[in-house]
């Protein structure tokens, strides 16, 4: 699972105005546990956009969404938002 994140509105990432933070999360096929295997910081960010815990939580939600879609497409592009209440 590859997560791209920017602070603020996502249109900066979508429009190519900013290269966001890239986090790659992999699933252990035996245990199902998720773990970050690579992180590339955003060029403009002074600190990570997502904590490790937030990235793993989001990856878990994205995995569930892909499973709900029955993996019918090899690539999914999910849009998401994080606010004070959690991920949307």
Image (cartoon, rainbow, N blue to C red):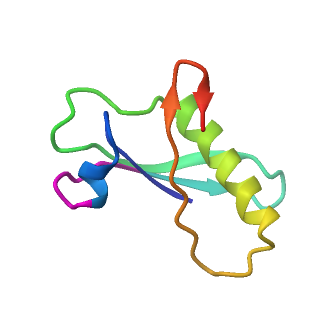
Q: Position of residue 7 (x, y in %)?
A: 31, 34
Residue 6 is left or right of residue 64, and the answer is left
The part of the chain drawn in magenta is: 15-22
Q: Which quadrant would residue 69 be assigned to in this image?
A: bottom right
40 lies above or below 30: above
* Rendered location of residue 20, percent (x, y): 29, 49
Q: Is the magenta stretch mostly helix, strand or loop?
A: loop
Residue that appears at 23% across and 60% down: 15
Q: Which residue is drawn at 74% across and 81% down?
A: 72
Please say if 40 is above or below 74.
above
**Quadrant assignment for the C terminus:** top right
Residue at 32% x, 40% y: name it: 9
Q: x and y percent of residue 2 in the render? A: 49, 59
Residue 60 lies left or right of residue 17; in this view the side is right
Residue 14 vertical position relative to residue 43 in the rendered view, above or below: below
For the point 50% across and 32% down, which residue is it? 82
Is 84 a magenta residue?
A: no
Q: Nearer the viewer, residue 72 or 15?
A: 15
Q: Where is residue 38 in the image (x, y as percent from the top left)?
A: 43, 51
**The image quarter in which residue 5 lies:** top left
């Amino acid at each position: 699972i590859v997560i791209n994140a920017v602070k603020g509105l996502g249109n900066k990432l979508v429009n190519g105005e900013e290269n966001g933070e890239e986090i790659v999360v992999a699933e252990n096929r035996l245990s199902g546990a998720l773990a970050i295997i690579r992180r590339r910081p955003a060029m403009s960010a002074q600190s990570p956009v997502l904590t490790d815990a937030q990235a793993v939580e989001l990856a878990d939600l994205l995995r569930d969404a892909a499973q709900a879609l029955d993996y019918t497409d090899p690539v999914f592009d999910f849009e998401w938002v994080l606010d004070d209440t959690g991920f949307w």
